[in-house]
Image: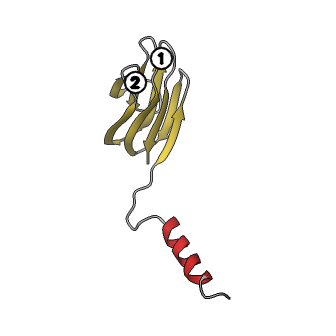
């Protein structure tokens, strides 16, 4: 085996590995007006990213539930701007996002 090949393989393996203690979140992309169950059960809502703004009074209502009811975590005006909203909040029942009214935004919801 060539002398340079093993160090190269080891370096690539280290670069592709997650850092020790890294927190990895699952994600759900929402791109239409709908009721979307993002997570079932306890966990953490880390962030919601507005990738593309909604139009005409569009909102995203976020619930700590597996249905479009119960404890409201946030009501987001998706027409205001793009960007990432950090929540980092614990949920007991689950995460449901309802996007409604006007043109739908493109959202990414990160949770564990």
Residue at horizontal 49 percent and vertical 72 percent from the top: 14
* Up-down relation of residue 56 to residue 51 (above or below): above
Q: Which residue is mark 1?
A: 100
For disc 1, the neighbor class at 10 Å (few under 14, some 14 to 19, many from 20) is: some
Marks 1 and 2, how far apart in space? 8 Å
Q: Which of the marked residues, 1 or 2, is nearer the chain's N terminus?
A: 2
How packed mark 2 is, by other alpha carbons closer than 10 Å (few <14, some 14-19, many 20 or more), is some
The location of residue 84, given as percent across then percent down, is 37, 36
Checking the image for residue 61, the label placed there is: 2
Mark 1 near mark 2, Cβ–Cβ under 8 Å? Answer: yes
Query: Colour mode?
Result: secondary structure
Q: Which quadrant holds residue 13?
A: bottom right
How many marks the image carries: the answer is 2
- Residue at the image position 48 percent from the left and 40 percent from the top: 39
**How far from the left and from the top, in percent, is residue 2?**
65, 87
Q: Position of residue 9 (x, y in %)?
A: 59, 76
Q: Residue furthest right?
A: 1
Given residues 38 and 25, the one toward you in this image is: 25
Quarter of the figure with residue 72: top left
The quarter in which the N terminus is drawn is bottom right
Secondary element type, mark 2: strand
The residue depicted at 39 percent of the width and 61 percent of the height is: 22
Question: Is the residue 13 above or below the residue 104 in the image?
Answer: below
Horizontal placement of 16 versus 2: left or right?
A: left
């Amino acid at each position: 085996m060539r002398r340079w090949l093993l160090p190269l393989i080891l370096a690539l393996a280290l670069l592709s590995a997650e850092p020790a203690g890294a927190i990895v979140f699952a994600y759900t992309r929402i791109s239409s007006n709908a009721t979307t169950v993002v997570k079932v059960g306890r966990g953490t809502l880390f962030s919601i990213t507005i990738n593309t703004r909604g139009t005409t009074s569009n909102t995203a209502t976020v619930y700590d539930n597996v249905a479009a009811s119960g404890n409201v975590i946030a009501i987001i005006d998706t027409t205001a701007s793009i960007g990432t909203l950090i929540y980092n909040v614990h949920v007991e029942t689950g995460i449901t996002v309802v996007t409604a009214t006007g043109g739908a935004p493109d959202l990414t919801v990160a949770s564990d």
